[in-house]
Image (cartoon, rainbow, N blue to C red):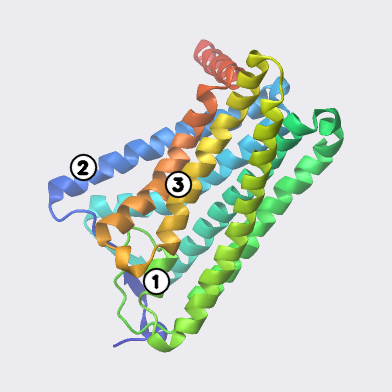
Amino acid sequence: MSNSSSIRHFLLLALADTRQLQLLHFCLLLGISLAALLGNGLIISAVACSHHLHTPMFFFLLNLALSDLGSICTTVPKAMHNSLWDTRDISYNGCAAQVFFFMLFMGAEFSLLTVMCYDRYVFICKLLHYGTLLGSRACAHMAAAAWASGFLYALMHTANTFSLPLCHGNALGQFFCEIPQILKLSCSHANLKKIWISLVGFCLAFGCFVFIVFSYVQIFRAVLRIPSEQGKHKAFFTCLPHLAVVSLFVTTGTFAYLKPPSLSSPSLDLALSVLYSVVSPALNPLIYSLRNQELKAAVWTLMTGWFQKH
């Protein structure tokens, strides 16, 4: 038996037992990371360099791409290192830092998705007031609030998680330091604190989720009142990428953190974590660029300009 004061490192989940499979996992993680870096990097560069994309929707999309890059860079490099060098170790401080930054980027992402939902609501339901409600200063304040809420959320969860006494060893059943896996190592008398941590996180996430659902109910009601079929389709497909990203992020993340213990299994836990922490940030640029002609045109101009210079 050990407690948190004697733990100097944690053991992460080994993704494979054989050397060949370890190298295969390294290549897969490398490919996903490069795709995420390329996709999100192109969005950030295109929005920053194209003046006609300096609108609230693309400003928030730039911030979302930054949070996606941050979450990928927080978890995947260590997993790649462990697969390449056949190790499982992560230091106690490194684990705490990984939890903090991962929760920072995940909290900021959920807040940004909520703000982006408000942007779509104002654009469709209150178009005449769009410039007033979502001016440059208001957008900057909302983005700053999203990042600040992510910071406070991460600080609260990290401080509470690592203040718990750990009595069940140091082996984590995940490829990165995930809070539910650390809570499994805590002592039985810390159950009340574990419930409090989960409850606070659930209430904050549930509040954002209710706001998103309410906004989309209003959006779809407004879309159905549009007389032309072309207008309906344009308004609907404007919201579709955001709705797809929200659905993927919320369903996988919520189920990973709030699923009952009876449904927990190592393979399911791993699959869910890969979906919301790796696949979702890598897919977001593709989802947003598929239906957005302005963004695709800006990315294409950026890429052709770069190739011409080189």
Q: What is the C-alpha distance between the residues marked 3 and 2?
A: 19 Å
Name the spot of residue 291 as percent of width and height, x first.
54, 22
Callout 3: helix, strand or loop? helix
Quarter the N terminus occupies? bottom left
Crowding around mark 2 (Cα neighbors within 10 Å: few <14, some 14 to 19, many 20+) is some
Q: Amino acid at mark 1?
A: Ile
Callout 1: helix, strand or loop? helix
Q: Amino acid at mark 3?
A: Ile
For the residues bearing labels 3 and 1, Cβ distance under 8 angstroms? no
Q: What is the C-alpha distance between the residues marked 1 and 2?
A: 27 Å
Residue 190, numbered label: none
Residue 24, numbered label: 2
Quickly name the residue at label 1.
182
Quickly name the residue at label 3.
72
Name the spot of residue 26 as percent of width and height, x first.
27, 45
Crowding around mark 3 (Cα neighbors within 10 Å: few <14, some 14 to 19, many 20+) is many
Rendered image quadrant of residue 255 = bottom left
Residue displayed at 32% across by 51% down: 271
Q: Of discs 1 and 2, which sits in the foreground?
A: 1
Name the spot of residue 268 as percent of width and height, x first.
29, 56
Q: Amino acid at mark 2?
A: Leu
Q: Nearer the viewer, residue 114 or 13?
A: 114
For the residues bearing labels 3 and 2, Cβ distance under 8 angstroms? no
Q: Of discs 3 and 1, which sits in the foreground?
A: 1
Sequence-wise first label, 1 or 2 = 2
Callout 2: helix, strand or loop? helix
Residue displayed at 42% across by 85% down: 5
Q: Is residue 92 visible?
A: yes
Residue displayed at 20% across by 49% down: 22
Q: What is the C-alpha distance between the residues marked 3 and 1?
A: 20 Å
Residue displayed at 56% across by 20% down: 299
Crowding around mark 1 (Cα neighbors within 10 Å: few <14, some 14 to 19, many 20+) is many
